Image (cartoon, helix red, strand yellow):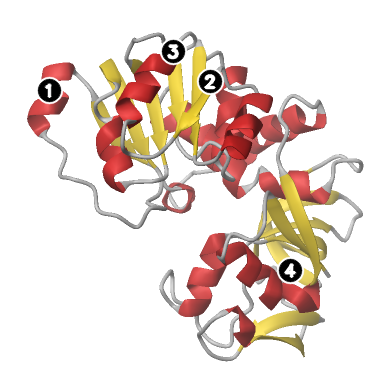
């Protein structure tokens, strides 16, 4: 089969097209013909060796839309997805007319958004939700799912007017500048002067610090990334106890490794919502398999918008 393989660690240009043997599925696994593979920021970090360093030679990628030997079209986590064939686990069948990019957008990013709201924040209908970086891969889905799950008011933060318009178009009740300076004042104003119940944060640093100051009693701040690259201040236990607020974190990778964890229930709901048009994943560019290095470089340097995929 054809695959994009790295013989050494480095930047995305270390990937090269190679002919390699078909992978052999183990117990409980299925070999699929890859229709499309999804790209993630973590793929570039793995290539550099800064995230879950791989064993070389290495074929990146962990998510595919593919065709099973019995003809089913499925969405699944995969091994070595930048290839024409891949081994998958616990595939979920998807409609024939569901675009591959939309399906792949709800795998890692959609599952993360689903669990941020359902599992980590334990959102109660009627509560107010702030989604930081609301135009991002997880954020734009969290905005929509928060409304779907009954949030009373959803506020998205984003860095530019165009991104804030996108957030509003996706159903947020308000969209504000997400920079740390003046963050608390803008968020509180967008919520009618009242503190909020839930904040989902992928930014970290001073924005995370500011978010602790907008929570209502028994509010929850859930961190799932640190895209700013800046350090946050230590969380003051006195602040937590005085205001009855909670600070937590979520990472899908660790969650999925827990015994008994499965994505099937959440994925089934996400696919149904997407197929019905009630969840609108933002999809981006499509690249040929042999363009994987360029695609990953474009993704890592934020020259793309929406879910980026490879077509073997």
Q: Can you identify the residue that label 4 sits on? A: 86
In front of the other: 185 or 208: 185
Q: Is residue 154 left or right of residue 266?
A: left
Q: Secondary structure at mark 1?
A: helix
Choose the circle earlier in sequence order: 3 or 2: 3
Q: From this view, report whether residue 254 is shown above or below residue 78.
A: above
User: Would residue 92 be visible to someone looking at this image?
Assistant: no
Q: Secondary structure at mark 2?
A: strand
Q: Secondary structure at mark 4?
A: strand
> What's the CA distance linking mark 4 and mark 3?
42 Å
Choose the circle earlier in sequence order: 4 or 2: 4
Which dot marks residue 151? none
Q: Disc 4, disc 3: CB below 8 Å?
A: no
> What's the CA distance linking mark 3 and mark 2?
15 Å
Examine the image and state in which quarter residue 195 appears: top left
Q: Disc 1, disc 3: CB below 8 Å?
A: no
Q: Can you identify the residue that label 1 sits on? A: 241
User: Would residue 69 be visible to someone looking at this image?
Assistant: yes
Mark 3: few/some/many CA within 10 Å (<14, 14-19, 20+):
some
Choose the circle earlier in sequence order: 2 or 1: 2
Q: Can you identify the residue that label 2 sits on? A: 174
Q: Disc 4, disc 2: CB below 8 Å?
A: no
Q: Is residue 49 left or right of residue 5?
A: left
Q: Secondary structure at mark 3?
A: loop
């Amino acid at each position: 089969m054809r695959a994009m393989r790295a013989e050494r660690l480095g930047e995305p240009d270390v990937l090269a097209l190679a002919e390699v043997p078909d992978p052999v599925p183990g117990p409980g696994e299925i070999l699929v013909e890859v229709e499309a593979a999804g790209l993630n920021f973590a793929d570039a970090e793995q290539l550099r060796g800064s995230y879950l360093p791989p064993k070389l030679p290495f074929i990146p990628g962990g998510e595919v839309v593919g065709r099973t030997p019995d003809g089913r079209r499925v969405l699944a986590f995969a091994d070595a997805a930048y290839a024409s064939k891949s081994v998958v686990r616990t595939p979920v069948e998807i409609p024939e007319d569901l675009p591959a990019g939309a399906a792949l957008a709800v795998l890692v990013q959609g599952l993360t958004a689903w669990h941020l709201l359902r599992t980590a924040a334990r959102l109660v209908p009627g509560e107010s939700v702030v989604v930081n970086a609301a135009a991002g891969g997880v954020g734009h889905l969290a905005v929509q799912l928060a409304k779907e799950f009954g949030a009373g008011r959803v506020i998205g933060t984003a860095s530019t007017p165009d991104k804030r318009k996108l957030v509003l178009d996706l159903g947020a009740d308000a969209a504000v500048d997400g920079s740390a300076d003046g963050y608390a004042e803008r968020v509180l104003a967008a919520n009618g002067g009242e503190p909020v119940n839930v904040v989902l944060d992928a930014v970290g640093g001073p924005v995370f610090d500011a978010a602790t100051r907008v929570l209502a009693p028994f509010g929850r701040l859930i961190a799932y990334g640190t895209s700013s690259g800046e350090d946050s201040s230590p969380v003051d236990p006195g602040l937590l106890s005085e205001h009855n607020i909670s600070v937590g974190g979520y990472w899908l990778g660790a969650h999925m490794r827990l015994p008994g964890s499965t994505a099937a229930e959440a994925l089934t709901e996400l696919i149904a919502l997407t197929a019905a048009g009630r969840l609108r994943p933002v999809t981006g560019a499509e690249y040929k398999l042999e363009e994987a290095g360029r695609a990953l470089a474009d993704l890592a340097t934020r020259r793309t918008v929406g879910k980026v995929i490879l077509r073997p």
